[in-house]
Amino acid sequence: MIRFGIIGTNWITEKFIDAASNIEDFSLVAVYSRTEERAKAFAAKFDVTNIFTDLETMAKSDVLDAVYIASPNSLHAEQSILFLQNGKHVICEKPLASNLKEAEAIVQTAKAHGVVFMEALKTTFVPSFVSIKENLHKIGTVRRYFANFCQYSSRYDKYKEGIVLNAFNPAFSNGSLMDIGVYCIYPMVALFGEPTDLRANAYMLESGVDGEGTIIFSYPEMEGVVSFSKISNSFIPSEIQGEKGTIVIDKISTPSKVEIHYNDGTVEDISRPQVENTMYYEAKEFIELIKENKTESQINTYANSLTTSKLMERARKQIGLVFPADRN
Protein backbone atom coordinates (compact mmCIF):
# COMPACT_ATOMS: atom_id res chain seq x y z
CA MET A 1 0.00 0.00 0.00
CA ILE A 2 1.35 3.41 -0.98
CA ARG A 3 0.36 6.07 1.56
CA PHE A 4 -0.35 9.40 -0.14
CA GLY A 5 -0.47 12.95 1.08
CA ILE A 6 -1.95 15.73 -1.03
CA ILE A 7 -1.01 19.38 -1.38
CA GLY A 8 -3.72 21.56 -2.87
CA THR A 9 -7.39 21.32 -1.90
CA ASN A 10 -9.05 22.03 -5.22
CA TRP A 11 -11.11 20.29 -7.90
CA ILE A 12 -8.09 18.78 -9.65
CA THR A 13 -6.98 17.20 -6.37
CA GLU A 14 -10.42 15.67 -5.90
CA LYS A 15 -10.27 14.31 -9.44
CA PHE A 16 -6.86 12.75 -8.77
CA ILE A 17 -8.11 11.15 -5.56
CA ASP A 18 -11.18 9.82 -7.37
CA ALA A 19 -8.96 8.30 -10.07
CA ALA A 20 -6.31 6.89 -7.75
CA SER A 21 -8.93 5.38 -5.42
CA ASN A 22 -9.59 2.81 -8.16
CA ILE A 23 -6.03 1.53 -7.78
CA GLU A 24 -5.59 -1.22 -5.21
CA ASP A 25 -2.34 0.12 -3.73
CA PHE A 26 -3.51 3.72 -3.22
CA SER A 27 -4.23 4.99 0.28
CA LEU A 28 -4.92 8.65 1.10
CA VAL A 29 -3.56 9.37 4.57
CA ALA A 30 -2.71 13.09 4.76
CA VAL A 31 -3.96 16.49 3.64
CA TYR A 32 -2.12 19.81 3.61
CA SER A 33 -3.64 23.26 3.44
CA ARG A 34 -2.38 26.62 4.65
CA THR A 35 -5.40 26.88 6.95
CA GLU A 36 -6.45 24.19 9.40
CA GLU A 37 -10.12 24.87 8.70
CA ARG A 38 -9.75 24.18 4.97
CA ALA A 39 -7.54 21.14 5.58
CA LYS A 40 -10.09 19.64 7.98
CA ALA A 41 -13.00 20.30 5.65
CA PHE A 42 -11.21 18.66 2.73
CA ALA A 43 -9.92 15.73 4.81
CA ALA A 44 -13.41 15.05 6.15
CA LYS A 45 -14.62 14.31 2.60
CA PHE A 46 -12.22 11.38 2.41
CA ASP A 47 -12.08 10.25 6.07
CA VAL A 48 -8.47 11.38 6.42
CA THR A 49 -7.18 12.06 9.95
CA ASN A 50 -3.67 13.41 9.32
CA ILE A 51 -3.89 17.18 8.84
CA PHE A 52 -0.90 19.40 8.10
CA THR A 53 -0.60 23.18 7.89
CA ASP A 54 3.22 23.13 7.83
CA LEU A 55 4.95 21.59 4.81
CA GLU A 56 8.28 20.86 6.56
CA THR A 57 6.48 18.89 9.24
CA MET A 58 4.55 16.99 6.58
CA ALA A 59 7.68 16.24 4.54
CA LYS A 60 9.44 14.81 7.61
CA SER A 61 6.42 12.79 8.73
CA ASP A 62 6.56 8.99 8.62
CA VAL A 63 2.82 8.64 7.98
CA LEU A 64 3.18 9.06 4.20
CA ASP A 65 5.30 7.58 1.39
CA ALA A 66 4.34 9.84 -1.50
CA VAL A 67 2.74 13.18 -2.26
CA TYR A 68 0.57 14.58 -5.04
CA ILE A 69 1.22 18.30 -5.57
CA ALA A 70 -1.47 20.49 -7.13
CA SER A 71 -0.50 23.89 -5.75
CA PRO A 72 0.05 27.01 -7.91
CA ASN A 73 2.78 26.57 -10.55
CA SER A 74 5.15 28.92 -8.75
CA LEU A 75 5.28 26.60 -5.73
CA HIS A 76 5.84 23.31 -7.58
CA ALA A 77 9.64 23.32 -7.51
CA GLU A 78 10.08 24.39 -3.90
CA GLN A 79 7.52 21.90 -2.62
CA SER A 80 8.69 19.02 -4.82
CA ILE A 81 12.30 19.48 -3.74
CA LEU A 82 11.34 19.62 -0.05
CA PHE A 83 9.55 16.28 -0.21
CA LEU A 84 12.15 14.61 -2.41
CA GLN A 85 14.87 15.65 0.04
CA ASN A 86 12.91 13.91 2.77
CA GLY A 87 12.70 10.66 0.81
CA LYS A 88 9.12 11.05 -0.36
CA HIS A 89 8.02 10.15 -3.89
CA VAL A 90 6.44 13.06 -5.78
CA ILE A 91 3.89 13.30 -8.57
CA CYS A 92 3.52 16.98 -9.43
CA GLU A 93 0.93 18.64 -11.63
CA LYS A 94 1.99 20.11 -14.94
CA PRO A 95 3.90 22.28 -15.57
CA LEU A 96 6.46 20.81 -13.17
CA ALA A 97 8.18 24.17 -12.61
CA SER A 98 8.24 27.88 -13.47
CA ASN A 99 11.37 27.57 -15.62
CA LEU A 100 14.13 25.20 -16.74
CA LYS A 101 16.44 26.02 -13.83
CA GLU A 102 13.78 24.91 -11.35
CA ALA A 103 12.93 21.82 -13.42
CA GLU A 104 16.58 20.76 -13.49
CA ALA A 105 16.84 21.23 -9.72
CA ILE A 106 13.84 18.94 -9.18
CA VAL A 107 15.29 16.18 -11.37
CA GLN A 108 18.73 16.45 -9.73
CA THR A 109 17.15 16.19 -6.26
CA ALA A 110 15.08 13.14 -7.23
CA LYS A 111 18.18 11.39 -8.60
CA ALA A 112 20.28 12.31 -5.56
CA HIS A 113 17.74 10.84 -3.14
CA GLY A 114 16.74 7.80 -5.19
CA VAL A 115 13.02 8.52 -5.14
CA VAL A 116 10.37 8.78 -7.86
CA PHE A 117 9.49 12.12 -9.39
CA MET A 118 6.96 12.30 -12.20
CA GLU A 119 5.23 15.20 -13.91
CA ALA A 120 1.47 14.64 -13.85
CA LEU A 121 0.84 15.22 -17.56
CA LYS A 122 -1.97 12.74 -18.14
CA THR A 123 -2.21 12.85 -21.95
CA THR A 124 0.71 10.54 -22.71
CA PHE A 125 -0.70 7.68 -20.59
CA VAL A 126 -4.26 7.45 -21.93
CA PRO A 127 -4.92 4.44 -24.21
CA SER A 128 -5.93 6.50 -27.25
CA PHE A 129 -2.67 8.46 -27.10
CA VAL A 130 -0.71 5.20 -26.84
CA SER A 131 -2.61 4.15 -29.96
CA ILE A 132 -1.50 7.33 -31.76
CA LYS A 133 2.11 6.46 -31.00
CA GLU A 134 1.71 2.86 -32.14
CA ASN A 135 -0.11 3.77 -35.37
CA LEU A 136 1.99 6.79 -36.34
CA HIS A 137 3.92 4.81 -38.96
CA LYS A 138 0.75 4.30 -40.99
CA ILE A 139 0.58 7.92 -42.16
CA GLY A 140 4.09 7.94 -43.70
CA THR A 141 6.52 10.82 -43.25
CA VAL A 142 4.99 13.31 -40.84
CA ARG A 143 4.99 16.88 -42.15
CA ARG A 144 2.92 18.75 -39.57
CA TYR A 145 1.84 18.36 -35.97
CA PHE A 146 -1.04 20.68 -35.17
CA ALA A 147 -2.28 20.83 -31.58
CA ASN A 148 -5.14 23.08 -30.56
CA PHE A 149 -6.38 23.68 -27.01
CA CYS A 150 -8.39 26.85 -26.41
CA GLN A 151 -10.61 26.88 -23.34
CA TYR A 152 -12.30 30.02 -22.04
CA SER A 153 -11.49 30.38 -18.35
CA SER A 154 -14.33 31.14 -15.97
CA ARG A 155 -11.82 33.27 -14.07
CA TYR A 156 -11.48 35.57 -17.09
CA ASP A 157 -14.91 37.03 -16.31
CA LYS A 158 -13.56 38.16 -12.93
CA TYR A 159 -10.43 39.48 -14.66
CA LYS A 160 -12.56 41.68 -16.90
CA GLU A 161 -14.24 43.03 -13.77
CA GLY A 162 -10.83 44.07 -12.47
CA ILE A 163 -10.29 41.11 -10.13
CA VAL A 164 -7.01 39.30 -10.95
CA LEU A 165 -7.26 35.73 -9.64
CA ASN A 166 -4.32 33.27 -9.56
CA ALA A 167 -5.00 32.04 -13.10
CA PHE A 168 -4.04 35.42 -14.57
CA ASN A 169 -1.40 36.46 -12.04
CA PRO A 170 2.27 36.18 -13.12
CA ALA A 171 3.31 35.84 -9.46
CA PHE A 172 1.98 32.28 -9.61
CA SER A 173 3.75 31.47 -12.93
CA ASN A 174 0.41 31.19 -14.69
CA GLY A 175 -1.05 32.16 -18.05
CA SER A 176 -2.23 30.46 -21.20
CA LEU A 177 1.10 28.89 -22.20
CA MET A 178 1.82 27.38 -18.78
CA ASP A 179 -1.70 26.20 -17.96
CA ILE A 180 -3.00 25.18 -21.40
CA GLY A 181 -0.16 25.29 -23.92
CA VAL A 182 1.78 22.60 -22.05
CA TYR A 183 -0.91 20.10 -23.13
CA CYS A 184 -0.04 20.86 -26.75
CA ILE A 185 3.75 20.92 -26.39
CA TYR A 186 4.41 17.89 -24.17
CA PRO A 187 2.74 15.34 -26.50
CA MET A 188 4.69 16.81 -29.42
CA VAL A 189 7.96 16.30 -27.54
CA ALA A 190 6.90 12.78 -26.53
CA LEU A 191 6.19 11.86 -30.17
CA PHE A 192 8.85 13.79 -32.10
CA GLY A 193 11.54 14.89 -29.65
CA GLU A 194 13.09 18.33 -29.37
CA PRO A 195 12.60 20.78 -32.27
CA THR A 196 15.49 22.78 -33.69
CA ASP A 197 13.84 26.18 -33.39
CA LEU A 198 10.63 27.98 -32.42
CA ARG A 199 8.77 31.21 -33.06
CA ALA A 200 6.21 32.34 -30.51
CA ASN A 201 3.47 34.94 -30.61
CA ALA A 202 0.88 35.87 -27.99
CA TYR A 203 -1.69 38.37 -26.82
CA MET A 204 -0.47 39.71 -23.48
CA LEU A 205 -2.92 40.82 -20.81
CA GLU A 206 -2.31 43.91 -18.68
CA SER A 207 -1.72 41.69 -15.64
CA GLY A 208 1.47 40.46 -17.33
CA VAL A 209 0.45 36.97 -18.49
CA ASP A 210 -0.52 35.72 -21.93
CA GLY A 211 -4.22 35.34 -22.64
CA GLU A 212 -3.64 33.27 -25.77
CA GLY A 213 -0.81 32.36 -28.10
CA THR A 214 0.59 30.37 -30.99
CA ILE A 215 4.01 28.74 -31.42
CA ILE A 216 5.57 27.31 -34.57
CA PHE A 217 8.26 24.68 -33.95
CA SER A 218 10.81 23.69 -36.59
CA TYR A 219 11.94 20.08 -37.12
CA PRO A 220 14.25 18.81 -39.89
CA GLU A 221 11.35 17.31 -41.92
CA MET A 222 8.24 18.80 -40.36
CA GLU A 223 6.80 21.65 -38.33
CA GLY A 224 4.81 21.73 -35.14
CA VAL A 225 2.07 24.32 -34.73
CA VAL A 226 0.39 24.78 -31.37
CA SER A 227 -2.48 27.12 -30.53
CA PHE A 228 -3.75 27.74 -27.00
CA SER A 229 -6.01 30.19 -25.18
CA LYS A 230 -7.66 30.94 -21.84
CA ILE A 231 -9.73 33.81 -23.22
CA SER A 232 -11.58 32.04 -26.07
CA ASN A 233 -12.93 28.62 -26.99
CA SER A 234 -12.08 26.46 -29.99
CA PHE A 235 -14.02 23.50 -31.31
CA ILE A 236 -11.64 22.17 -33.97
CA PRO A 237 -9.62 18.98 -33.46
CA SER A 238 -5.86 18.50 -33.47
CA GLU A 239 -4.05 16.70 -36.30
CA ILE A 240 -0.86 14.90 -37.19
CA GLN A 241 -0.46 15.23 -40.95
CA GLY A 242 1.59 12.65 -42.86
CA GLU A 243 2.23 12.05 -46.53
CA LYS A 244 -0.07 8.99 -46.58
CA GLY A 245 -2.79 10.24 -44.25
CA THR A 246 -3.74 12.36 -41.27
CA ILE A 247 -4.44 11.39 -37.66
CA VAL A 248 -7.38 13.44 -36.36
CA ILE A 249 -7.49 13.83 -32.55
CA ASP A 250 -10.65 15.10 -30.89
CA LYS A 251 -8.91 16.70 -27.88
CA ILE A 252 -5.15 16.87 -27.48
CA SER A 253 -5.27 17.06 -23.66
CA THR A 254 -7.36 13.89 -23.36
CA PRO A 255 -7.53 12.06 -26.71
CA SER A 256 -10.64 9.92 -26.85
CA LYS A 257 -11.82 9.76 -30.48
CA VAL A 258 -8.84 9.25 -32.79
CA GLU A 259 -9.09 8.45 -36.51
CA ILE A 260 -6.69 8.05 -39.41
CA HIS A 261 -7.98 9.68 -42.60
CA TYR A 262 -6.00 8.13 -45.45
CA ASN A 263 -5.33 9.88 -48.76
CA ASP A 264 -7.55 7.38 -50.61
CA GLY A 265 -10.56 8.48 -48.58
CA THR A 266 -10.73 5.54 -46.17
CA VAL A 267 -10.98 6.17 -42.44
CA GLU A 268 -9.61 3.94 -39.65
CA ASP A 269 -10.80 4.44 -36.08
CA ILE A 270 -7.81 3.82 -33.80
CA SER A 271 -9.54 4.97 -30.59
CA ARG A 272 -9.24 2.66 -27.59
CA PRO A 273 -11.59 2.13 -24.66
CA GLN A 274 -10.56 4.11 -21.58
CA VAL A 275 -11.96 4.99 -18.19
CA GLU A 276 -13.84 8.26 -17.88
CA ASN A 277 -11.48 9.80 -15.33
CA THR A 278 -8.30 9.72 -17.39
CA MET A 279 -6.11 10.72 -14.43
CA TYR A 280 -6.32 7.04 -13.50
CA TYR A 281 -3.53 6.15 -15.93
CA GLU A 282 -0.94 8.60 -14.59
CA ALA A 283 -1.74 7.59 -11.00
CA LYS A 284 -1.37 3.91 -11.94
CA GLU A 285 2.00 4.53 -13.62
CA PHE A 286 3.31 6.45 -10.59
CA ILE A 287 2.23 3.80 -8.09
CA GLU A 288 3.72 1.00 -10.21
CA LEU A 289 7.05 2.85 -10.40
CA ILE A 290 7.18 3.01 -6.60
CA LYS A 291 6.20 -0.65 -6.19
CA GLU A 292 8.82 -1.78 -8.71
CA ASN A 293 11.57 0.35 -7.11
CA LYS A 294 12.02 2.38 -10.29
CA THR A 295 12.86 6.07 -10.10
CA GLU A 296 11.76 7.38 -13.50
CA SER A 297 8.81 6.84 -15.81
CA GLN A 298 9.69 5.61 -19.28
CA ILE A 299 6.72 7.57 -20.65
CA ASN A 300 6.84 10.89 -18.79
CA THR A 301 10.61 10.83 -18.70
CA TYR A 302 12.85 13.46 -17.15
CA ALA A 303 14.03 14.28 -20.67
CA ASN A 304 10.48 14.97 -21.89
CA SER A 305 9.74 17.19 -18.90
CA LEU A 306 13.01 19.11 -19.18
CA THR A 307 12.68 19.59 -22.95
CA THR A 308 9.11 20.86 -22.57
CA SER A 309 10.20 23.22 -19.80
CA LYS A 310 13.05 24.52 -21.96
CA LEU A 311 10.76 25.14 -24.94
CA MET A 312 8.19 26.98 -22.83
CA GLU A 313 10.92 29.18 -21.35
CA ARG A 314 12.23 30.02 -24.85
CA ALA A 315 8.69 30.86 -25.96
CA ARG A 316 8.16 33.06 -22.91
CA LYS A 317 11.28 35.04 -23.69
CA GLN A 318 9.98 35.74 -27.20
CA ILE A 319 6.57 36.96 -26.03
CA GLY A 320 7.89 38.84 -22.99
CA LEU A 321 6.28 36.67 -20.34
CA VAL A 322 8.37 37.02 -17.18
CA PHE A 323 7.72 35.47 -13.75
CA PRO A 324 9.14 36.50 -10.36
CA ALA A 325 10.65 32.97 -10.26
CA ASP A 326 12.85 33.90 -13.24
CA ARG A 327 14.64 36.52 -11.18
CA ASN A 328 15.74 34.10 -8.45
Image (cartoon, rainbow, N blue to C red):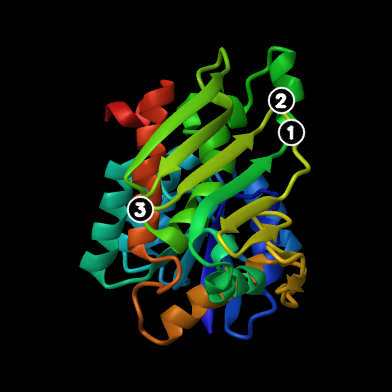
Secondary element under disc 1, as helix, strand or loop, is loop
Q: Give whichever of 143, 178 is nearer the camera.
A: 143
Residue in the picture at 66% in, 71% down: 128
Q: Which residue is mark 3?
A: 194
Looking at the rendered structure, which numbered label has been put on residue 156? 2
Residue at the outermost left position: 112
Residue 182 position in % (x across, y down): 52, 46
Who comes first in sequence, dot 3 or dot 2?
Answer: 2
Q: Where 119 sits versus 315, above or below?
A: below
Q: Where 131 sits versus 57, above or below?
A: below
Q: Where 160 sits versus 322, above or below?
A: above
Q: Give whichever of 119, 7 is nearer the camera.
A: 119
Mark 1 to mark 2 CA distance (whole Å): 7 Å
Residue 125 position in % (x across, y down): 57, 70
Q: Which residue is mark 1?
A: 152
Tag 1: amino acid? Tyr
**Residue 91 can be seen in this image:** no
Residue in the picture at 31% in, 54% down: 106
Secondary element under disc 2, as helix, strand or loop, is helix
Tag 2: amino acid? Tyr
Pointer 1: residues within 10 angstroms few (<14), some, or many (20+)? some
Who comes first in sequence, dot 1 or dot 3?
Answer: 1
